Amino acid sequence: MRVGRAHRVGLIIDGDAYFKAFTYAALRAERSIVIVGWDFHSRTRLHHGIAGVPELLGDFLNYLVRRRQRLEVRILTWDYPVLFAKGRELSPIYGLGWKPRRRVRLVYDDHYPIGACQHQKVVVIDGALAFCGGLDLTLSRWDTPEHGCHEPRRVNDGDRAPYAPFHDTVVAMDGEAARVLDDLVRERWQRATGSRLKRFIPPADLWPDHLPVAITNVDVAVARTRAPMGDEPPVREVLELYLDMLAAAKRVIYIENQYFTAETLTEMLARRLAEPDGPEIIAVLRLSTEGWLEAPTMGTLRTVQLRKLRDADRYGRFHAYYPHIPDLPNDQCCDLHSKLLIVDDEYLRIGSANFSNRSMGLDTECDVAIEARGEPRVARVICEFRHSLLAEHLATTRERVDEAVRETGSTSAAIERLATDGRSLRRYDRLDEPPNALVAVAGVVADPEKPVSLDALIEQFSPEMTMRRAWPLWFAPTVLIVLLGILTALWHVTPLSGWTDAARVLAWAEGFARVPGAPVVILLAYTPAAVVLFPRPLITLLAVAAFGPWHGFVYAYLGILIAAMGTYALGLRLDRQAVRRIARGGLNRLSQVMRRRGVIAMTALRLVPVAPFAVVNIVAGAIRISPMHFLLGSALGILPGTLVATVFGDQLITGLRNPASIDPWVVAAVIVLGILLGIATWSMRRWLLAASPDTHGTQPRPID
């Protein structure tokens, strides 16, 4: 993306050091804190014992804006699908759990293709100090470099059982390098919300006293991944930087990564292994993958890539390890979460991008890199950092790693010399051949390199399949007749008829009509029904049975309008991001049609099932559609459907009382009106789709 000069750079290992650095830096913030992440959780414990400072992240951010009157906190996190909801926090927009103060705003970013995620992990303070790496401000991330199996503090707030040891890396930087990341998070915020963040001149030095400076006055490069969206081309800076760094290696490539599935990168490593004088490759990976989706997919793909490199390793230079911590429970291993690459003593990169296909072209990623460029002071820092990481994994000191590398002449030989039966690095020995079918599914479902369309999935899994009508025209009527036959049989041979006979049902409805306030109950019943998606025609049927067709129609018609205006008023009051999450992907289409077409759009949206009734009303209120336009369009749009439901209900009730009294002309009229209404709905739907082209993948229009 860009290269910026940093006055200071800090190289942070593990959550204890990162959370502490973030806490002390945030305490110095005057105007702005921007947090961009894959996840965010207000119950994250940041520290253990800083006097007078709240320990939990949500309380801490509220504390900061209370003590700094001009401070604004902005949090941008992945708008995750329900598949990934386990362990995540219920959104504060629902009014439950953590309650952000007025100048703390949490936004869920949905500006990415289907199947992708927002995976960048960046924090920028006052536009002048930035953190970038693999750590989110969320649960199960805090740990110390000791990774003790009995660490009593490695427990999430409210839990009793400790989570697994967690290892990760982060870079801190200031100066121009921090401003590059500030530009990046501003661009992300504008894409997600449509609004621009203010720029501030930092009032003071923000570097926390507790954060050691690893190096001064060095260039820092920022590389991104972003999938193609709309007219925007893909951004693959992360991939290009990976390939360039691997190609430049002379002595040693050191990889620490949560995953190891990227085919393009594996092919590059295989080519380097085929060279007689190529570099040795050290890969430190997590032992096991977790989760019902991740374990059979990412674990399978990792095995495939490791087997490829083992087969390509003609000269014995590829070595894959995992951190071993003795005495852990059987269901735990060291959760190595880093996204790090060090090449010789020349290049160091840390960020959010996994060594996976999706991080190369699908997910939104951000890495930062430092290059020595022949400067011994920078090369020394890079070498020391690599040896510090190895010392942590081998439970020894950096000085001993330095000595072992110097005496053996290679990093892999030093690891073998320092390895013990206790906490150490152990080799991946078992690489069983995975089934081909599982490999194919894993590559498409869990780790694609680019957005995958439905047509592509069909072609992948069933190449001979062509798109056709799912069922012949006669299928639906036949199923309906069969179901009616089954219901009729049940009616006659089971006690159902005794409980639901016509006389009993009608008597109940007539008794309800004599209850004081019954009309008010009908009028108000439509509002909660709209919210919980209860079928409105059933309430209309009750109204007709209780009060007759004319009064029933009036009560139903007015009740639906009251429900519409009530949920419209809710849209006026809801936070814009809450509306975005309620409307989900249909927000842009709804808002565009409503803004451009007014009364006509509201009438059409009542006839066409583009979105649930309540969602249409809430969005209309949120984007400030004129109340008169909303009411008039709603009144016109619900009239045909309410009339059909009333007439149909009246004839149904008449038939229950006396089948001979059914008016066949009225029934025919209802059928004709229903057909005409269906044709009108189909026509309106085509008009709506033409009026609001699919906006997925383009800049979302803000709700204001």
Image (cartoon, rainbow, N blue to C red):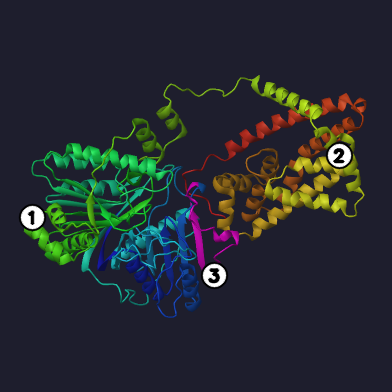
Residue in the image at 45% along x and 29% along y = 458
Q: Amino acid at mark 1?
A: Gly
Considering depth in this image, is 466 or 260 the residue closer to the camera? 260
As helix, strand or loop, the secondary structure at mark 3 comes to: loop
Q: Earlier in the sequence, mark 1 or mark 2?
A: 1
In magenta segment, residue 87: yes
Q: Quadrant of residue 538?
A: top right
Considering depth in this image, is 339 or 65 the residue closer to the camera? 339
Q: Nearer the viewer, mark 2 or mark 3?
A: 2
Distance, label 2 to label 3, CA atoms, is 52 Å
Q: Is residue 435 above or below residue 389?
A: above
As helix, strand or loop, the secondary structure at mark 2 comes to: helix
Q: Residue furthest bottom?
A: 51
Q: Is residue 336 above or below residue 498?
A: below
Q: Is residue 245 above or below residue 164?
A: above
* Label of residue 409 in the image: 1
Residue position marked by numbered label 2 in the rendering: 505
Numbered range of the magenta stretch: 83-110
- Quarter in which the C terminus is drawn: bottom right
Q: Residues within 10 Å of mark 3 (few under 14, many from 20)?
A: some
Considering depth in this image, is 215 or 255 the residue closer to the camera? 255
Q: Amino acid at mark 3?
A: Arg
Q: Is residue 381 above or below residue 589?
A: below
Residue position marked by numbered label 3 in the rendering: 101
Residue 677 vs residue 126: left or right? right
